[in-house]
Image: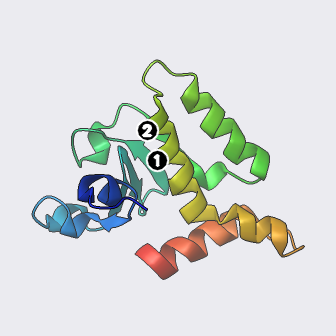
Amino acid sequence: MFGENREAANAYQLVPISEFRGGRERYAHLHRWGPWLLDAERIVLCRCPNHDDPLRAKYEVDIERVETAQDLLFWISHIAEKAWGDALTVGHLAIAMDALFRPRTLLLDGQRPVARDILKLTIERNWG
């Protein structure tokens, strides 16, 4: 998909923060999609484009409060309207939301489990 461009390929892969920038264990509970970090302890996505410290983040999305597909679309649209909401930032947010909530699974299964339950199970299973 990305050919020989490893930088572009890495931008779209989930990289545990312990493997990112020299393996700092202080942030082992974090995971990155472009400028977005998942803080699995606080259950928020933090916009941290130039650092790995979520407590210094100037913008957070409280993903624990996302309950419907409309909530997912709201956040993607909301970030797109920000002055800093460029295509890469919004695209990485959409990829993060897809990885966390698996909206296609929700829509295709015919069942409507609570998104919060799916979020917690996904974080525990994949990044906990």
Residue 32: name its quadrant.
bottom left
Task: Judge the density around disc 2: few (<14), some (14-19), many (≥20) Cα neighbours within 10 Å.
Answer: few
Q: Could you tell me residue 34's position as x and y percent? A: 36, 48
Q: Amino acid at mark 1?
A: His
Residue type beneath disc 2: Leu
- Name the residue located 73 percent from the left edge and 65 percent from the top edge: 104
CA–CA distance between discs 1 and 2?
A: 6 Å
Q: Residues within 10 Å of mark 1 (few under 14, many from 20)?
A: many
Q: Is residue 75 left or right of residue 39?
A: right
| Marker disc for residue 88 | 2
Return the x and y of residue 45 as percentages of the image width and height: 46, 49
What is the quadrant of the N terminus in the image? bottom left
Q: Secondary structure at mark 2?
A: helix
Locate residue 13 relative to residue 104 in the image: left or right: left
Q: Which residue is mark 1?
A: 92
Q: From this viewpoint, which residue is outermost toward the bottom?
A: 125
Image label count: 2
What residue sits 14% from the left and 64% below the top? 24
Q: Which mark is residue 16?
A: none
Which residue is most to the right? 110
Residue located 61% across and 66% down the image? 119
Q: Are marks 1 and 2 in contact (CB under 8 Å)?
A: yes
Q: Residue at x 80, y 71 (%)?
A: 113
Q: Is residue 32 above or below residue 57?
A: below
Depth check, front residue: 18 or 85: 85
Is 78 on the left-hand or right-hand side of 58?
right
Q: Position of residue 29 (x, y in %)?
A: 32, 66
Location of the C terminus (image quadrant)? bottom left
The quarter holding residue 51 reads top left
> How far from the left and from the top, in percent, is residue 8?
32, 52
Q: Secondary structure at mark 1?
A: helix
- Residue 87 visible in the picture: yes
